[in-house]
Amino acid sequence: MPIQTIPELFLSAVRERPRSDCFSYRDATRKYVPVSSEEAYRRVRALRHGLKSLGVKKGDRVALLSENRLEWALADLAILCAGAVSVPVYPTLLPGTISYILRDCQPCAIFVSTPHQATKVQGLRAELPFLQDVIAFDPTDLPNVLPFGKLLRIGDNIVAEHPPEPRDDCLPVDPDDLASIIYTSGTTGNPKGVMLSHWNFVSNVLGTRELIHFTTADRCLSFLPLSHVLERMAGFFTMLYLGVGIAYAESVETVPQDMFDVQPTVVISVPRLFEKLYARALGAALAGSSIKKNIFFWARRVGLEYGHQRRELSPISPWLRLRYSLADRLVFRKLRARMGGQIRILVSGGAPLAPKISEFFYASGLAILEGYGLTETSPVLAVNTFTDFKIGSVGKPFTGTEIKIAEDGEILARGPQVMLGYYNDQAATREVLSPDGWLATGDIGYLDEDGFLIITDRKKDVLVTAGGKNIAPQPLENAIKTNKFVSQVIVIGDKLPYLSCLIVPNFENLAAQIKQEGIIATDRAALIKLPGVIALYDRELARINESLPSFSQIKKYALLDHEFTIEDGVLTPTLKVKRWAIVRKYQNIIEGLYPPSLE
């Protein structure tokens, strides 16, 4: 029988592609500990029966408030195998947003990771009369909290006393049954609950299998939030089904060390990781001797030329092959070694990847397969593959997916991965989903002559200047972010006479540069005010503006002494920029970029 539900997907994986390290995680000694497919199956079965003993029924909602860890994955599978609906909640969310989500979906139970997360929920219990059970992964002294280990033991005892029939492993879950409610990250307001069915997810998993070849020799490092649909589908369900081992990073901060220790062959990420890796390589070259710096930039030029020839299927001369071999030995091999040395597949999604970053990695022998999708599409709508690959695009439409462009340039999509709708919000559903199944994505783009999808911007992010010019900020931001002295940037200009931007400097590269020039600063706040630093950014921005038409040039900018963060409320948990939040937070700075006489 074909796989159509997540319980079937899980059982197929553990029975047909078992492995000794189905999952692995760092223990208290910081060593990676493997968990076999057999053991994962035992724990999921026990948790499923434990949940049933608590009264969890088919269709009930069960929430998950936790950082990435093995228990998250096991609990998610147990919820789905019980026929219940899994509701992941980002652990970085503040109590007010958590309360909003829980009151909207009304779960009967919630898994929490740490005492900190348990305390968040405990403070909300009075607002949540429907919440019967709180299950904690880590020990906590809080009352009325069920330890995760105890729930496992309850389930094990039930299985021992009443051994289930083999057919009981897959409850009668239908492909169109609701599997999960994933709340959007709220870039434009309160989060909406995206309803995804078992078949929504599974169709994406099966389509991925057809387009990208994974094997049981592969190992994936998982560090994106499992609460995010990209990691859930691609880094969890797909890896599990295809027999790829999943190793959980200790944290986002430890990813470089985790890569070195795990030596993954598969990494699924958002652009921010690749931006940081590129900036680190560039910074190391700039901080080195003049010889080291010249070697790096020579190798980059050779690699870009070699990569371009390969993508164009042009003959590569023996002289270019020889130079590239030397460049690889001197520079690119070291980059791959810092990523564990075994990388075979890199996937990027969640936000646009700057073409220059993609070109650099391709030059280094690491093609980044950039894709595109939404929470509402489970998520993949298009993806680059090793056989259909074009830098600057997000690939060709996914298996079984139709894409068309509306008159205003908005991308419309239809396929088996499109959501059931928004939970408790029929009006919002009707705004984006037509009766015949076409989803309005909210993104602007086009299909090129070769059938590749090109994203130009978010429909709501398009800036309309006071002069009536429509400008997409993301391509401008990507162009600026590739500058070695820029870490983060946001372009401003909606309803204003010209474009400006807020820049977070790459302080590591900036420090190396000013040291060479004999400039001294005691801290970041003082650094960004130095005349020499301002002159440097004036020059860099002027160079970027040279390639832009006058109406889309950046006229003014402000330097910030700190990064945009989730904690500051200006990034979503998946590191997307909340433009409205940045405009509000930095209103005084932005106003200073526009003289009153011009407003």
Image: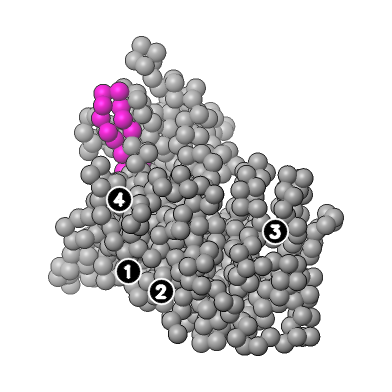
Q: Which numbered dot is residue 206?
A: 2
Q: Are marks 2 and 4 in contact (CB under 8 Å)?
A: no
Return the x and y of residue 587 as percentages of the image width and height: 49, 25
Quarter where residue 579 is shown: top left
- Element type at mark 3: loop
Element type at mark 4: strand
Residue beneath label 3, please?
108
- Queried whether the magenta region covers residue 195, the answer comes back as no
Q: Nearer the viewer, residue 481 or 223?
A: 223
Q: What numbered label is drawn on residue 411?
A: 4
Precedes in sequence: disc 1 or disc 3? 3
Kindly identify which residue carries mark 1: 399
Q: Tell me the quarter of the picture where residue 270 sits.
A: bottom left
Q: Would residue 501 be visible to someone looking at this image?
A: yes
Residue 258, x across and y down, in percent: 56, 65
The magenta segment: 463-477
Relative horizontal placement of residue 239, taking residue 404 as reference (left or right): right
Q: Earlier in the sequence, mark 3 or mark 2?
A: 3
Q: Mark 1 belongs to which amino acid? A: Thr
Residue visible at 67% across and 67% down in the picture? 57
